[in-house]
Amino acid sequence: MILRSVESRPTEATEEKRLVPAWEAVFRAQQQRASGYWLIAQPDHAALAGDLAEEFTRGPYPHLEEDAVRAFRLHDAGWAPLDGGSERGVGTGSARPRPEPRRSPDGRPLSFLEFGPRDFLPAWNGSIERAEQASGAVGGLLVGEHFVRLARTRLDSVRDSEEESCLTRRFLEEQAALQAKWIASAGSGMTRERVQALTDVLQFCDLLSLYLCCGSEEDVSFPQAFAGQRPVLRRRDGTCRLEPSPFSDKVVAGITARLDRTNTEKTFELVLR
């Protein structure tokens, strides 16, 4: 689950706020203690990432074919057994029931960032499989490479048990074999360089969606670079303004959340330019 505090965060009154790394803003939002939480399913967050990608029409961002956008929408579909949620825009037609979230000993729902390899690796594999089903080799390549990058970062920065680290290393070995198979069948236009460029876009859309879902109101910078430019997002007059912007006009993004321990749902809407 992605957690969104029920408490609003007042924005600073200054004209220019300090830029913080987008991941830092997301981490901070997931760690925040609150009196209650809105819960956003990972498949719903992924669908939002794909919806945003579909609106990319300008700027330095690579052109996205339909199969890539489909893969973006499904890049967290494998979390459905844990989170519920839906696969909007891919013909599935219905949302899955939302399971009760896992909780810490004090009753706080667990964020997706608090799951270990025994939980997230099956979710990753399920997401890769679903993306390949929907978008063929391109889907497997892009979503697989996305999680390969996350796995490498995990091994470098998190102290898992040796058994858990072995599971992550095995995932990387399995992905190396699958990636070789998919790159051979994806067609001459899908080079390894193209895979890397499109995965950069996937990870940008993923992080942008996470930022929008988590409720942060900080101005943020993104780690990906496109034609030498790193996107930043500034919040002004109720609008999220991306520089450089991938949008030719304003985009209204919506995400549905469920209030923890209730059946109450709410759609949060944000305007992007």
Image (cartoon, grey):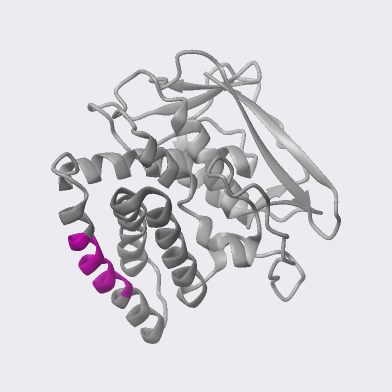
Q: Residue 195, can we see it?
A: yes
Image point (59%, 61%), residue name: 80
- Whole-percent x, y for residue 172 in the image: 28, 69
Residue 249 in the magenta stretch? The answer is no
* Residue 108 at x, y percent in the picture: 73, 65
Say which of 17 and 108 sits in front. Answer: 108
Left or right: 103 in relation to 199: right
- Residue 226 lies, in percent from the top left, at 28, 30
Q: Is residue 8 visible?
A: no
The residue shown at (72%, 60%) is 98
How many numbered tags mark residues here? 0
The overriding secondary structure of the stretch rendered in magenta is helix
**Position above or below: 65 against 111:** above
Residue toward you, 47 or 209: 47
Judge whether 140 appears above or below 102 on screen: above
Instruction: Please determine whether, in this image, residue 231 is positioned above or below residue 32.
Output: above
The answer to which image quadrant residue 244 occupies is top left
The percent coordinates of residue 87 (x first, y second) are 57, 48
Q: Residue at x 73, y 60 (%)?
A: 97
Q: Is residue 30 above or below residue 48?
A: below
